[in-house]
Image (cartoon, helix red, strand yellow):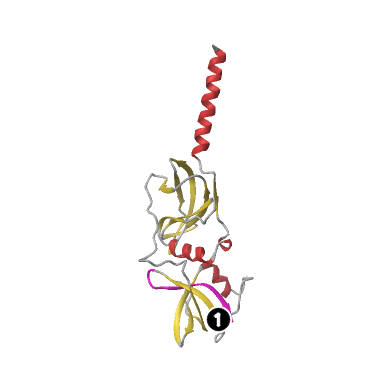
């Protein structure tokens, strides 16, 4: 009788272990190096991160991993962090619990986010916060797809302020923002410093946000 009970317990433990591992995401990994991503993905992240919610990028043909963006939206804190508390697959749905940790209050807004790669047998994603609140999927504005960039060339004029640069395009002075990864191009202390000067002829790619802002995602001297 004791051997029978012991055998049943082993079976029960094995089944419980199977159910746990069958329902978990095979792998969830934070993407720390945005530079390893395509220009289009980086531009999309730069626009979407201003929203609170999540966005699932389409998997390419044959790709096992899905790229998922989780964002807290605008937050007036420094060191505000977003992370994945748990990720489990159930009935073909990847259920993610997003954790948030506040930092120090600040007068300047930040847009905390985390970008993850998730692998597993799922066709849909649902995201909740630690208190069980469901988050909405992020959306691009009115048919605007920032992964579709516009290629252009012009004459570099200079930096208008901390956010905008001016380039003359087809004879018209035009202001542009930069994606975060290009800021070091204008930082003399950075190894990526490009030393752009007034009248430099440049080639660049940009996209237009739902608010009409032109954002440069790549920039080089001709």
Q: Residues within 10 Å of mark 1 (few under 14, many from 20)?
A: some
Q: Is residue 210 above or below residue 8?
A: below
Q: Which residue of the protein is positioned furthest toward the right in this rendering?
A: 191
Magenta segment boundaries in residue numbering: 210-222
The one of 74 and 155 positioned closer to us in this rendering: 155
Q: Which residue of the protein is positioned furthest toward the left in this rendering?
A: 142
Q: Where residue 34 appears, x then y in whole percent?
A: 55, 61
Q: Where residue 110 appears, x then y in whole percent?
A: 45, 62
SS assignment at label 1: strand
Q: How many marks?
A: 1
Residue under the point 46% across and 88% down: 171
Residue 146 lies left or right of residue 14; in this view the side is left
Confirm whether the magenta stretch covers residue 40: no
Q: Where residue 134 appears, x then y in whole percent?
A: 37, 48
The one of 16 and 182 positioned closer to us in this rendering: 16
Q: Where residue 43 appears, x then y in whole percent?
A: 49, 66
Report the quarter where the C terminus lies: bottom right
Report the quarter where the N terminus lies: top right
Q: Which residue of the protein is positioned furthest toward the top in this rendering?
A: 1
Residue named by callout 1:
202
Residue 127 lies left or right of residue 26; in this view the side is left
The one of 3 and 186 positioned closer to us in this rendering: 3
Residue under the point 42% across and 45% down: 130
Residue under the point 47% across and 64% down: 44
Q: Main secondary structure of the magenta part?
A: strand
Q: Quadrant of residue 92 in the image?
A: top left
Q: Quadrant of residue 137 in the image?
A: bottom left
Residue under the point 54% across and 71% down: 183
């Amino acid at each position: 009788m004791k051997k029978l009970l012991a055998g049943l317990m082993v079976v029960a433990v094995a089944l419980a272990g199977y159910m746990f591992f069958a329902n978990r995401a095979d792998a969830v990994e934070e993407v720390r190096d945005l530079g390893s991503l395509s220009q289009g993905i980086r531009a999309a992240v730069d626009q979407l991160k201003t929203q609170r919610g999540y966005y699932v990028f389409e998997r390419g043909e044959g790709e096992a991993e899905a790229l998922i963006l989780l964002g807290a939206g605008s937050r007036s804190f420094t060191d505000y962090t977003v992370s994945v508390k748990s990720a489990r697959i159930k009935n073909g749905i990847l259920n993610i619990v997003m954790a948030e940790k506040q930092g120090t209050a600040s007068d300047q807004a930040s847009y905390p986010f985390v970008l993850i790669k998730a692998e597993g047998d799922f066709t849909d994603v649902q995201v909740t916060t630690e208190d069980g609140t469901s988050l909405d999927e992020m959306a691009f504005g009115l048919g605007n797809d920032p992964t579709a960039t516009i290629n252009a060339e012009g004459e570099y004029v200079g930096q208008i302020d901390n956010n905008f640069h001016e380039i003359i395009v087809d004879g018209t002075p035009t202001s542009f923002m930069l994606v975060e990864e290009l800021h070091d191009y204008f930082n003399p202390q950075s190894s990526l410093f490009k030393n752009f000067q007034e009248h430099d002829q440049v080639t660049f790619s940009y996209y237009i946000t739902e608010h009409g802002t032109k954002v440069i995602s790549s920039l080089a001297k001709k």
